[in-house]
């Protein structure tokens, strides 16, 4: 009963370029992550366009008007939390996680919501009874290091506390 449609990579790339052009009108600090996802640092656009929620509404409106697509936007102080917020805003929504609410927002979520917890890591954490991001945050880093390796343990532990120092890396100067 499945309906199988042909893949149209050329069309996807064309539409992606149009969406990214809308984003780059807001700020040149745009980091494309995939064909339909990007991080924006709007700190420099706030004086011109207003607070982040107004900028997000503007982005969603411009994408709908010029490309004809819905857009989900997550707003947060870090890239990792913004990505999770965007996932929670789907379909076609907007979710702001204020910096002081970051830890409360994260700690109730399943550990698999963290960027970097895939099937293999998720299975290890599940086996150890680490089910939520809060469980991960409260786990001793030494224990996590034995399970996941030192680098992954420190990285995921930081993300579980809302710590993500990675800046938006614009692909163009």
Image (cartoon, grey):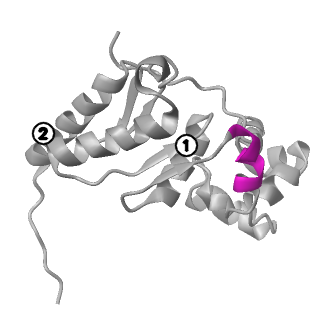
The span picked out in magenta is 99-105
Which of these two is toward me, 120 or 41? 41
Disc 1 + disc 2, Cβ < 8 Å: no
Q: Decide: is 134 above or below 32.
A: below
For the view shown, which residue lies furthest in the top direction? 173
Q: Decide: is 4 above or below 26.
A: below
Q: Closer to the N terminus: mark 1 or mark 2?
A: 2
Which of these two is toward me, 14 or 157? 14
As for residue 146 lying within the magenta part, the answer is no
| Disc number placed over residue 82 in the picture, else none | 1
Q: Identify the main secondary structure in magenta.
A: helix
How many other residues sit within 10 Å of disc 1, few (<14), some (14-19) or many (≥20)? many
| x and y, in percent, of residue 69 in the image | 22, 52
| x and y, in percent, of residue 165 in the image | 66, 26
Q: Residue at x 24, y 43 (%)?
A: 63
Residue 163 showing in the rendered view: yes
Quadrant (top left/top right/bottom left/bottom right) for the N terminus: bottom left
Question: Is 56 displayed left or right of 16 in the figure?
Answer: right
As for residue 100 lying within the magenta part, the answer is yes
Question: Is 79 displayed left or right of 127 in the figure?
Answer: left
Quadrant (top left/top right/bottom left/bottom right) for the C terminus: top left
Q: Decide: is 93 above or below 53.
A: below
| x and y, in percent, of residue 87 in the image | 48, 56
């Amino acid at each position: 009963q499945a309906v199988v449609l042909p893949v149209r990579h050329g069309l996807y790339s064309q539409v992606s370029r149009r969406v990214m052009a809308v984003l780059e009108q807001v700020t040149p600090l745009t980091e494309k992550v995939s064909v339909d996802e990007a991080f924006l640092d709007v700190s420099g656009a706030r004086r011109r366009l207003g607070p982040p929620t107004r900028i997000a509404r503007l982005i969603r409106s411009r994408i709908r008007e010029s490309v004809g697509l819905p857009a989900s936007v997550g707003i947060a102080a870090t890239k990792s939390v913004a990505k999770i917020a965007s996932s929670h805003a789907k379909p076609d929504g907007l979710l702001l996680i204020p910096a002081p609410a970051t830890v409360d927002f994260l700690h109730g979520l399943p550990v698999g919501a963290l960027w970097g917890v895939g099937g293999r890591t998720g299975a290890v954490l599940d086996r150890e009874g680490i089910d939520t991001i809060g469980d991960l945050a409260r786990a001793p880093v030494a224990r996590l290091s034995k399970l996941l390796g030192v680098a992954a343990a420190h990285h995921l532990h930081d993300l579980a506390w809302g710590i993500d120092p990675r800046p938006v890396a614009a692909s163009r100067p």
